[in-house]
Amino acid sequence: GAGVSQSPRYKVAKRGQDVALRCDPISGHVSLFWYQQALGQGPEFLTYFQNEAQLDKSGLPSDRFFAERPEGSVSTLKIQRTQQEDSAVYLCASSLGLATQDTQYFGPGTRLTVL
Amino acid sequence: LAKTTQPISMDSYEGQEVNITCSHNNIATNDYITWYQQFPSQGPRFIIQGYKTKVTNEVASLFIPADRKSSTLSLPRVSLSDTAVYYCLVGGYNTNAGKSTFGDGTTLTVKP
């Protein structure tokens, strides 16, 4: 079956531009996570959705980062006025239920490069 | 925080058994231990999850001692395709001990 998909796979932005990263979770998955992964490091939690409700956004590094999941399926991570330190791979993961220790299924990520 | 400590890297040869140990001294009562595998340019992939003693599936075994302050992922008879980064994750993202993190993982290199 279809897994988690993310688009675009690669994004190059000039400093100061706004970007939008899309995540299509596995159909029917209730929980959705966004992570940021810097080169050579593990994924760092950004935000968590349960259906359309954003229950935790404590990992978002600044108010330039915004995420939404308006209909409880597709999610978008938006970064405004991108900075060079935003360069990273942005991973989306979904899980079937509400339990926070359910298996997470990850997408391939979007590699963002800010020049 | 539910911090974990793993070796940064390990080398092995094809056909050998590989054991990767993760320390998690402040694991909470309700926390499960989950291992993920990540290849370059891909997202992490679930390998195995356990709470105590031993869990085995078709690809790996997970050994957890009684005090649960550590866990060992065992990969039997590794092949070149097992070269990847392996992450130990304790609890869910909002474990009672704080937000769970993936840490920096263990880079396993399997040589011919």
Image (spheres, coloured by chain):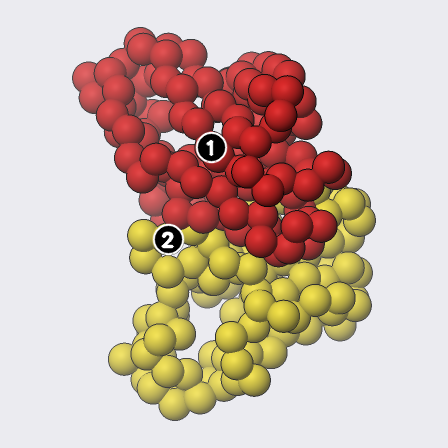
Judge left or right: residue A67 versus residue B106.
Answer: right
Q: Which residue does the numbered mark 2 point to in the structure image?
A: A41
Q: Is residue B27 above or below residue B57?
A: below
As shown in the figure, which amino acid type bears the numbered disc 2?
Gln
Instruction: Provide the secondary structure element on which disc 2 rests.
Output: loop
**Residue at left offset 64%, top offset 20%:** B66
Image x and y of residue A34, in percent: 58, 61
Q: Nearer the viewer, residue B40 or B64?
A: B64
State whether discs 1 and 2 lie on one chain: no
Q: Dot 1 falls on which chain?
A: B
Q: Is residue B78 above or below residue A48?
A: above
As shown in the figure, which amino acid type bears the numbered disc 1?
Cys
When asked about the image quadrant of residue B52, the answer is top right
* Residue A26, label in figure: none
Badges 1 and 2: C-beta atoms under 8 Å apart?
A: no
Chain B palette colour: red
Q: CA distance from mark 1 to mark 2?
A: 16 Å
**Does residue B40 appear anywhere in the picture?**
yes
Chain corresponding to yellow in the figure: A
* Residue B22, label in figure: 1
Q: Is residue A79 above or below residue B100?
A: below
- Specify the quadrant that holds the C terminus of chain B: top left
**Residue at left offset 59%, top offset 42%:** B26
Q: Nearer the viewer, residue A18 or B50?
A: B50
When asked about the image quadrant of residue A102, the answer is top right
Mark nearest the camera among 1 and 2 is: 1
When asked about the image quadrant of residue A11, the answer is bottom left
